[in-house]
Image (spheres, helix red, strand yellow):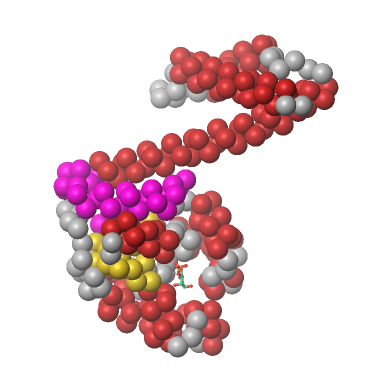
Amino acid sequence: MIKEPDTLMLIGFMGAGKTTVGREIARQHHSKFLDLDREIERAAGMSIAQIFKEHDEDYFRRIETQVLSQAQTFNGVVATGGGVVERAQNREILKNSPATLVYLHGNLESTISRLLAEGQRPLLQEKSTADFFQLWEARDPKYQEVANFTVETVGKTPQRIAAEIVALFSANEDELAFLALRSQIDAFDRQLFDIISKRMEVVLAVANYKKKVGMSVSQPTRMSNMRAALKVDYAQNPNISDEFIDELMTILLETAMKREDEEMQRG
Ligand code: S3P
């Protein structure tokens, strides 16, 4: 059961948003916030980049273990570093921890775009794309192993993720699995809307092309061909019926045509 914890610890890959979400939970929940990476820098007397440059990853990990042990009784929200689950010793500390551990789970695309926006991490700089992907895959089961709860972050704002986590404190045991599934559904919805928005951008590019060549907005043959092709491609999928394809395509096409018309009238 996730009760309102004395210590809430966020784990997850670099770029998962642990620090941002952690600060936001602390703000929404009026609690204190501790960033383990900053504690490591304080203990070492230098920045993380410097630790990796002047020493090595092993040296960094040893300080990380010390700082992690001390953080177990911190009264508030703790953001850990992405590699905290690397050492078996740390995983033991986490599994026996009185803290509640929440895994912020993203996907590779969301992780990379956050990292690009935020700037570099030492481990990112020295890794090839293949190594990075391998690290991402290898760590996922380690986070799962120690986490009390997994929150799906893809497409969600830090505020929404924080609110989902705060809501866990009032949930009972039975509700937790249900809330974890809902967390996934909410992320899918956001991904759907992101894709629909991207689709609309392409629709507008199509509208501009049609205008340039003097084509009419509505192309009935193309539309019925689109539907027919979708029905063939999804014929074996019991979740996507012909009726669903018709209903969704009607919504998408009507909305797109309205938007195209607006765009064309605007000049
Ligand atoms: C690391 C992640 C970093 C930091 C260090 C190592 C890792 O923390 O602890 O660069 O091994 O993934 P963030 O997860 O906050 O980026």
174 and 171: which is toward the camera: 171
Q: Residue at x 19, y 49 (%)?
A: 170
Residue 133 in sight from this viewpoint: yes
Q: Residue at x 68, y 14 (%)?
A: 218
Give the quadrant of the C terminus. top right
Residue 188 at x, y percent in the picture = 43, 39
Query: Could you say which quadrant of the image residue 141 lies in?
Result: bottom left
Up-down: is 67 above or below 161? below
Query: Could you say which quadrant of the image residue 212 lies in?
Result: top right
Up-down: is 162 above or below 207? below
In the shown orientation, is residue 103 left or right of residue 237? left
Residue 145 in sight from this viewpoint: no
Residue 175 among magenta residues: yes
The range drawn in magenta is 148-177
Residue 213 among magenta residues: no
Residue 44 at x, y percent in the picture = 43, 87
Furthest residue toward right: 213
